[in-house]
Amino acid sequence: MTALLDRIPEGVFRVIAFVVIALLLGMILFPLYFMATTAFKVEREIYSELTWIPREPTLENFRAVIYSFRIPLYLRNTLIVALSTTAIVVVFSTLAAYAMTRLRFPGRGWLARGVLFVYLIPGSLMLIPMYLIIVNLRLKDTYLGLIIANMSFAVPFCTWLLMGYLRGISAEMEEAAMIDGCTRLGTLWHIVLPLSVPGLVTAAIFVFNGVWNEFIFALVLAQDESRRMISVGLSNFYRSDYYMVGPMMAGSLIAMAPVVILYILAQRYVVGGLAAGAVKG
């Protein structure tokens, strides 16, 4: 197979690569384009025929989701849960990843494999046990209950990601600092964390995105509308058997805006963090 690939002329290979990338971009961007254009269409245009550009652009769908579907409340709830979960998970995962990559203790290898095993368990399998735990703790329909539930899948993922990044940081610098009198926590604060900024930012963004898009826990653990998350709120754009496509698309645009802005602002950290973790992990 490798020999066959080596015989393909570079020009042909570039054309094939361009076509594949163009197809992938089309598959990704077309739904976004359809969502964006539909959000600005009037109702009769949406249901009468397929048009690529709104004939009568309107902001009525955005007004409807803000004043009729309580999207600002859902966004506030999601921001509180996502930001709180991200901050807690990054702190816990950094300490756990540092311990498993730097400290020597019995069972370290098994503990690292256990983190990966827990991360690979589908969230749906943890739904019933997590529901019982949250209900017994009287945390149903609370921010804390949602934060604990989201931590169950975010901590293993974030720990595993940071373990790969921390392995790429030279331990000799920490040893030199400790010889000069710095404590273990001092080396973590003054040496490891500054060098781990791309990895920490990458982990934080993926955790934030995962919590923002999480649906199952949000649906079951936050049934009170005052604690409803945006992922669940977007599924309520219907009246009886009639789906309100225009407001649904407008709400989806509003919901994806914070995540897109976050990715744009931290793009170089994400690329650097993923590349470093992939090579050195």
Image (cartoon, rainbow, N blue to C red):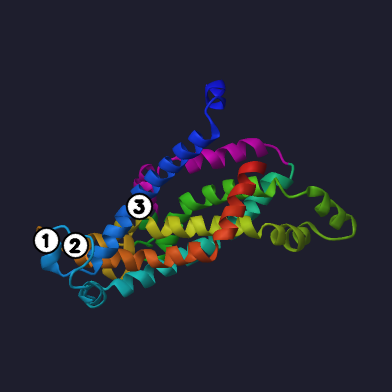
Q: Nearer the viewer, residue 258 or 159?
A: 258
Q: Determine which residue is flagged by label 2.
A: 245
Q: Residue at x 78, y 59 (%)?
A: 187
Residue 56 visible, this orientation: yes
Q: Amino acid at mark 2?
A: Val
Give the spatial CA distance, label 2 vs label 1: 9 Å
Q: Determine which residue is flagged by label 3.
A: 131
Dominant secondary structure (helix, strand or loop) of the stretch shown in magenta: helix
Question: Magenta segment: does it hold 130?
Answer: yes
Q: Determine which residue is flagged by label 1.
A: 47
Q: Residue at x 44, y 40 (%)?
A: 121
Say which mark, if any, is on residue 248.
none
Which marked residue is nearer to the observer: mark 1 or mark 3?
A: 1
Residue 69: percent from the left, percent from the top? 23, 71
Q: Nearer the viewer, residue 13 or 32?
A: 13
| Residue 239 lies in quadrant | bottom left
Element carrying mark 3: helix
Give the spatial CA distance, label 3 vs label 2: 32 Å
Q: Which residues are magenta?
A: 105-133
